[in-house]
Image: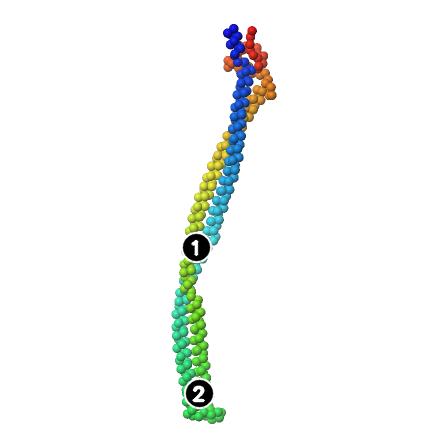
Amino acid sequence: MAEKSKSNTSPTPGNIVCEFHKKKEGERASHESALAASAILIESLEIERGYALCCRAKAEETGDYYRDLDNFELFDMQKSSEIIKAKIKTLVGQDTELGKAITAASKSLNDLKKKLQESNDAACQMHNCLQSLLGFKEEKVSGKHELSEKVTCVTDLAKKLSKHGQDAAAAMVKVAGIHTFSNLETLQPFGDKLTQAVTALKSGTDSLIVTAKKDEEKAQADLTLVLNNLNAEEFRSFGTTGVVNGYNGTLGFICEEECQPITCVEEICREIGKCESEAGESLHGQFATGDKD
């Protein structure tokens, strides 16, 4: 009776296989859940990868912009500002010399105007004196008339030269006024400020280039990290998929809708000592109870 009770409680091949089937189904479900979670994580990492690629592209675009600005614009601007500053300095020097020349010319013209005016006054006095003393008349054949013409020629020339001297002095006053209002010295601070502004812009752009380079390196490092994580998760997913496929194949082999007798399972059970059948005993399918009267 004890042996019969023990026989009744001993596991049968059918029980072993069904317990194995149930256990593997649970394990398969667990791996399928892990596979679903992995798919969600992969999708999230793919979005993160797209964002990292965008960040790297923007960082490279920013770096290229500042490098192009430095290479094609600021280089010319810096050289041009230095040339402008040097030209202004030269022009200011020339303007100073021009001012001195205008001052000297004005003095000379004023002296000349004064002397020509004095010559004109002297010629007029001579004409009036000769006319009153000699009594010039209009007879063209007389000697007095010839003298009168020569005196008149002198006085006319003196008057004309005096007028030219006055005109030249007036013109020089205008030139001096134009020179005063041109005031090229005021351009010198502008040239200095222009050079300082361009230099500051160049310095600021150099700093931005350095920052952009660091941003590019960080964006690449972030992208590499995301790619590594995505690659690792994809391989884990591939491994889990293989495990799930293995479970599907195993469970499909054991049971397709209904459990089928599998004599090889009974043989395996006999070998591991979990079957109640004795060695060499003829078995009758996976679900044999193994009870003996």
Q: Is 214 located above or below residue 173 in the figure?
A: above
- Name the residue located 53 percent from the left edge and 10 percent from the top edge: 8
Tell me residue 148's x, y (percent).
Answer: 45, 89
In what quadrant of the picture does the C terminus appear? top right
Q: Quadrant of residue 277?
A: top right
Task: Determine the residue positioned at 42% across, 51% down.
Answer: 203
Residue located at (44% from left, 66% from top): 182
Q: Which residue is mark 1?
A: 198
Q: Earlier in the sequence, mark 1 or mark 2?
A: 2
Q: Residues within 10 Å of mark 2 (few under 14, many from 20)?
A: some
Mark 1 crowdedness (10 Å alpha carbons): few <14, some 14-19, many ≥20: some
Alpha carbon of mark 1 to alpha carbon of mark 2: how far? 71 Å
Mark 2, secondary structure of its residue: helix
Where residue 152 sits, quadrant-wise, is bottom left
Number of numbered discs on residues: 2
Report the amino acid beneath label 1. Answer: Val
Determine which residue is flagged by label 2: 151
Label 2 amino acid?
Val
Q: Is residue 257 above or below residue 129?
A: above
Q: Is residue 272 visible?
A: yes
